[in-house]
Image (spheres, rainbow, N blue to C red):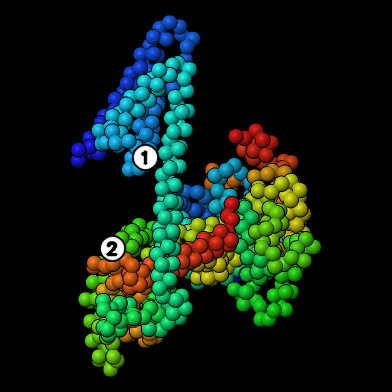
Amino acid sequence: MINTLLEENHMQENSILRAKYAAKNLDVYYADKQALFGINLDIMENQVTSLIGPSGCGKSTLLRCLNRMNDVIDICSVKGSIRLDGQDIYDDGIDVVELRARVGMVFQKPNPFPKSIYDNVAYGPKIHGMIDQKSDADEIVETSLKKAGLWQEVKDRLAAPGTGLSGGQQQRLCIARAIAVNPEVILMDEPCSALDPIATAIIEQLIDELKQKFTIVIVTHSMQQAARVSQKTAFFHLGSLVEFGDTDQIFTNPQNQQTQDYITGRYG
Amino acid sequence: MPYTTTISIFVSLCLLVTAYFWGVKRAIATKRSQTALSTQVKFHSLPGFHGAYVAIWCAIPSLVLFVAWQTLRPNFLPQWLAQDMAGLVLLISAGILGLFFAQKRIASRFKARHKVETAFSLVMLLSSLVAVFTTFGVVVSLVFETMRFFSKVSVSEFLFGLHWSPQIALRADQVASSGSFGAVSIFAGTLLITAIAMLIAVPIGLFSAIYMSEYATPKFRTWAKPLLEILAGIPTVVYGFFAALTIAPFMRNWGFELGLEISSESAMAAGLVMGVMIIPFVSSLSDDVINAVPQTLRDGSAALGATKSETIRLVLLPAALPGIVSSVLLATSRAIGETMIVVMAAGLAANLTANPFQAVTTVTVQILTLLVGDQEFDSPKTLAAFALGFVLFLLTLGLNILALKIVNKYREKYD
């Protein structure tokens, strides 16, 4: 206990950056099949960390462990620890609902609720009791949509259904929806894979702005995207963390041959 | 000759089978002889299609001729042609002519496959038209009989009259010789029982649908869902005597203990049992629409920190609402049209009451009692059944159309 505190103090003193998440010896199984092998990974606060690797390498599994979305899968079991601000999120005392309010998530395919744009954004704050009167909701909706860069486009039609927006707008609406709960971390699971290049560029710029306030973890298949938006990159292969480091270093001077092969496109 | 119809059906069937195999044989023979001459020749259709083609050509002319002969026979045909034997001969000769015509066309390039395709699409079109025309015929006959009824009893008396006693005296000096046809009490009874049934069926059906689709383990679901659907397969007669012999006496005794006056035939007993019967209609359809809501919405809601019940209440149910509403409406029209349960458990007396513990009667029960037994079909008594039936038809038709409209208008387009 004292050790952890000392360690944290130590880290805060030594650098402005602090580890938000710390995964230690993380093993994940789907029934008998092991999906992740002994992952050790620190995710720094107010940085963008990208998880890359070929399909089936376990990067999405790791992402879904970070807010315990894997809980809904009955056959999934987790060993080892993931600490969020020093507290193990797989502890018995942890309230998953509270955890997910602190850790927002944006999915591969935009999934706005079949409600109005306004209600989509107000949904999270409402269920977490952040709204006492109508003006609170109005304010949260406006600031969230502004942060997600969608306000100018939708401010005159907040009552229109969220499903009527274009794909890129829908994805930004989903980001606004996640921001509205005021999370500390935002997890993104290939957020641009269903979008065209222009919408992708807008989202990438948005991610860059969002890291001022949030810690961001992004799974992506696009190496260019990882290079553009992230400060740290983790390369996974067959359920193992092969290499983890500064994005610049990973893309210019990878230490591992597998990483080198993958980022230069020589892989698979 | 009394057996002519049977004989002609038998002969036509034999002819059809013969035609098919003849066609197949001819096609194979043609194919052999032509491919023997040159390898360039490609036979377009499989022998089976040629066989079917010949059989169709055998069936259609004889069928058309037979129908024409049957319709013309009573009035337009001369004596010698109107006889049964003449019909049989016509039938067979038309079939044989068609057969010979068709088998002549069998050749390597002949596209029997496409012709058979067309023929079958026509058969399917005719089949669907049968259903459409039946509905149309039922409506027309209902409308005409209803008009006859309203020429004897005024529309306003039927729709707004409070007194129902559809007895027509045989002699003018009998008691109640005029009969009275005020149907309000009957409609009220139908509404009362339907309302009770829906009060039972909607909450239980909906909750079971939600449990089945969101909470139940796959294992529980695989045996519980078919079991629930068996409820819909129990004959309504069985529900009827369950209501009349088990529920109604139980309720009467129970009411007696509490000091309530519950008659042994009551709207409550009928409504309760009908509600149970309708549960699977609500739950099965609602289950389907809740299941159709994409998983990504559940994930999205869970990732925002919503609990399961919040997700269901705030995301799934609103998304599935149109489907749920239409399932309720369909169940309602089913309840309105239900007969056996109410005949046995609700009673025959046309009481105008809102008390669910008294005997009431419904539209369906009255139609039944008006038409059971030997009746003459020109008295207002029997014609009243058609008027009631017409109202019932309009009511359920309206509900079904409303249900379809709601589904189409608010259907969520998930991609």
Within the image, what quadrant is residue A138 found in?
bottom right
Chain of the residue on which disc 2 is drawn: B
Instruction: Work out whether B352 lies above or below B126.
Output: below
What amino acid is found at the position of numbered circle 2 in the picture?
Ile
Q: Is residue B330 visible?
A: no
Disc 1 is placed on an element classified as helix
Q: Which residue is mark 1?
A: B76
The answer to whether A97 appears left or right of B250 in the picture is: right
**Which one is closest to the eye, mark 2 or mark 1?**
1
Q: Which residue is mark 2?
A: B234
Disc 2 is placed on an element classified as loop
Upstream in sequence: badge 2 or badge 1: 1
Q: Residue at x 75, y 69 (%)?
A: A143
Q: Percent position (x, y) of residue A131?
A: 66, 78
The answer to whether B166 appears left or right of B321 in the picture is: left
Q: Residue at x 63, y 65 (%)?
A: A115
Q: Nearer the viewer, residue B76 or A18?
A: B76
